[in-house]
Every structure is written in C-alpha cells, then in structure tokens.
Image (tube, rainbow, N blue to C red):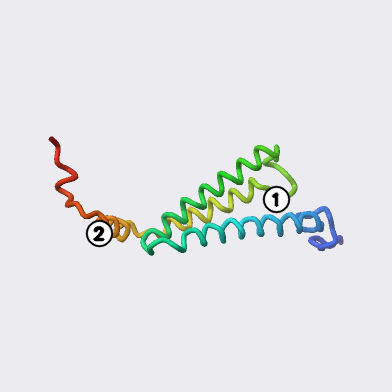
Amino acid sequence: MEQRGNFGDNRWPGGSEESQSGLQEAVLRVGIWFAVCLVLVSALPAPLALPVLSELLQFSALTALLAAALRGERLASNRLNNIDVAAALLLLALACSFFVDTEAVQAFLDFTNPEPKEALNHVQ
C-alpha cells in the first residue's frame, strides 16, 4: 500500500517546497498588511479603533486584489497569490467588524459634537 501525505511527495498540496514557500510568502504578506493597519489605527481613540481597522483591512484587500489583477494572477493557481491574500484580509476585516460596539461609537461621536441634536434636525 502506498503511503499518502508524505512531505516529499509532490502530488499532494503542501508536499512540494514551492507550495510551502508560497504559503509562507502569503502569510508574511497578510501579516505585514495587518501590522501596517494596526500601526495606523493605534493613534485613534478606542471606540473608533475596530471600525477603522476593519475599513483599512478592506482597503488593503482591494489593493492586494488590484495588484493581482495587474500581475494577471489567476484564481485557480497552484500557489497562493495576492487573490488569496485579499481573501484573508477580507476575513480579518469581517472578524473585526463583528466586535464593533456601535453604541460606544455613537456615544463617542455625540460627545465630540458640541451642537445639540435638535439643532441638527431643525428644518428651516
């Protein structure tokens, strides 16, 4: 009986060194994008951190997708490419958006707005 899943076997995903290096490159790209977004968000107030992080990750995913389109990368590739990086960044953005406290964001925005709400709703 033939043994399956051997790391030296090039017939299985993850078996070749090329596919493993592609995985490492993709994880590194996602990590770099996420770190840059975290650095940009670190200067914001706490209630705005997660919504802005989610938006930055979405823009990063769009940038990775644009890079994939300009390079002509295919969706059904044997290697992980920028399309997969964009999908991972969108997954992280979705995960961040699940933890956004909309009431805290609204309270923060109401606190920073010096005008009363009635003045904003007044129709002349």
Instruction: Kindly state the secondary structure of the residue where label 1 is placed.
Output: loop
Q: Earlier in the sequence, mark 1 or mark 2?
A: 1
Q: Nearer the viewer, mark 1 or mark 2?
A: 2
Q: Residues within 10 Å of mark 2 (few under 14, many from 20)?
A: few
**Which image quadrant is residue 49 in?**
bottom left
Q: Which residue is mark 1?
A: 80
Is 96 in front, or is 110? 110
Identify which residue is drawn at 17% across, 52% down.
116
Give the x, y percent position of residue 74.
70, 39
Q: Residues within 10 Å of mark 1 (few under 14, many from 20)?
A: some
Instruction: Kindly state the secondary structure of the residue where label 2 is placed.
Output: helix
Q: Is residue 115 left or right of residue 93?
A: left
What amino acid type is highlighted by mark number 1?
A: Leu
Give the x, y percent position of residue 26.
67, 55
In three-dimensional space, the C-alpha distance between marks 1 and 2, rounded to whole angstroms, equals 45 Å
Q: Which mark is residue 111?
A: 2
Identify which residue is drawn at 86% across, 60% down.
2
Q: Is residue 108 left or right of residue 82?
A: left
What amino acid type is highlighted by mark number 2?
A: Phe
Identify which residue is drawn at 71% across, 56% down.
25
